[in-house]
Image (cartoon, rainbow, N blue to C red):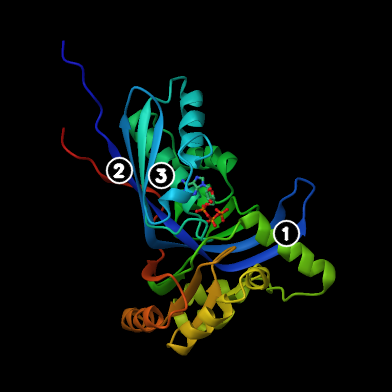
């Protein structure tokens, strides 16, 4: 009898930028209470999953050496978790192609976990809804649910409690990728220290920003972008001030640190402006490399179903 080998599944998952990141008080569980507006960017990772004799993870692309390939990798944890819930063994090989900078404040690990959940749901024909996958994903990491839904969303709690946000039009971004990463817990720790010592700037509530997103006007949106982690990221990596200045000097409408950094994100007026800003930043010697991206894009989705 012929045995049918399921096809490998390839899933693309987006990175994110926080258009607004308000960091509230430290909670009893050690997390900070957040109010954030996420936007999913076309800069993405691809995750390929195929049946195998045992669970393995392989990572290729820029920064691959810094990503663990054992149980510390979020895709490994996603596979073990979903297999347990499905009552089966996690017998798959998972290959991650990194396009999202590692430890760059763009939630690359969460994107990969979201991609693994979508891919395994497909490969194992589990029939779980996106909401069900998001509930499982929230246990793996706070940003995993957003990577599943994509688009633009308001996040509360640790960022996992999501509401979709209306965003008209496509926004054009330039990302300045830094040398080396920043540890998210170190940046939160630095913010706690700055707040103990003084009064670093805090973003206001995001109502006006949500209106600007609904209007689809990048010029209206630009001055409303804000990130409470920026002061802490800049204390840890002062050279990023030059990068932010260079992007705005090159014609971006605004620049901010993405999440916990060190990636700097620049909002541009249109595609041509983004290409011009990217070209000038590339030559300015203020970052490791430069990417352009559009947003919002959908959450983790199957992109290919190769023939057998
Ligand atoms: P955060 O999601 O905490 O804001 P980040 O976006 O700055 O983090 P990530 O690229 O998600 O950064 O990775 C943070 C760390 O998580 C890495 O340094 C790495 O050791 C670990 N990690 C685990 N799984 C992955 C993965 N699939 N891809 C990248 N990093 C991973």
Other residues around mark 2 within 10 Å, as few (<14) / some (14–19) / many (≥20): many
* Residue farthest along the top direction in this orientation: 1
Q: Position of residue 73 (x, y in %)?
A: 50, 40
Q: Residue at x 24, y 32 (%)?
A: 7
Residue 234 lies, with reference to residue 39, above or below; the image says: below
Q: Is residue 50 visible?
A: yes
Q: Position of residue 233 (x, y in %)?
A: 63, 68
Q: Tag 1, which secondary structure?
A: helix
Cα distance in 3D space between marks 3 and 2: 8 Å
Return the disc, 1 or 3, that comes first in the chain's sequence. Answer: 3
Disc sitting over residue 115 in the figure: 3
Q: Position of residue 116 (x, y in %)?
A: 41, 40
Other residues around mark 1 within 10 Å, as few (<14) / some (14–19) / many (≥20): few
**Residue 186 appears in which quarter of the rendering?**
bottom right
Q: Residue at x 43, y 55 (%)?
A: 63
Disc sitting over residue 189 in the figure: 1
Disc sitting over residue 10 in the figure: 2
């Amino acid at each position: 009898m012929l045995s049918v080998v399921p096809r490998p599944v390839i899933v693309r998952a987006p990175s994110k930028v926080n258009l607004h990141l308000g960091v509230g008080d430290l909670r009893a569980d050690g997390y900070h209470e957040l109010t954030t507006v996420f936007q999913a960017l076309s800069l993405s990772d691809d995750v390929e999953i195929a049946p195998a004799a045992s669970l393995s993870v392989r990572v290729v692309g820029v920064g691959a050496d810094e990503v663990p390939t054992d149980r510390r990798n979020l895709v490994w944890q996603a596979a073990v978790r979903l297999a347990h819930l499905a009552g089966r063994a996690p017998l798959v090989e998972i290959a991650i192609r990194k396009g999202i900078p590692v430890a760059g404040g763009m939630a690359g690990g969460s994107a990969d976990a979201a991609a693994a959940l979508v891919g395994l749901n497909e490969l194992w024909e589990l029939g779980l809804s996106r909401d069900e996958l998001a509930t499982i994903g929230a246990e793996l990491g706070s940003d995993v649910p957003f990577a599943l839904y994509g688009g633009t969303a308001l996040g509360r709690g640790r960022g996992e409690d999501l509401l979709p946000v209306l965003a008209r039009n496509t926004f054009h971004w330039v990302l300045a990728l830094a040398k080396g990463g920043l540890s998210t817990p170190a940046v939160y720790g630095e913010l706690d220290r700055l707040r103990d010592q003084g009064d670093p700037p805090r973003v206001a509530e995001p109502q006006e920003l949500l209106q600007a997103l609904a209007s689809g006007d990048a010029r209206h949106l630009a001055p409303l972008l804000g990130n409470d982690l920026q002061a802490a990221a800049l204390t840890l990596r002062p050279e990023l001030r030059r990068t932010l200045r260079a992007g705005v000097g090159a014609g971006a409408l605004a620049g901010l640190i993405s999440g916990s950094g060190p990636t700097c994100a620049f909002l541009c007026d249109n595609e041509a402006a983004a290409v011009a800003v990217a070209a000038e930043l590339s030559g300015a010697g203020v970052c490791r490399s430069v990417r352009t991206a559009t947003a919002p894009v959908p959450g983790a989705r199957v992109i290919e179903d190769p023939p057998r």
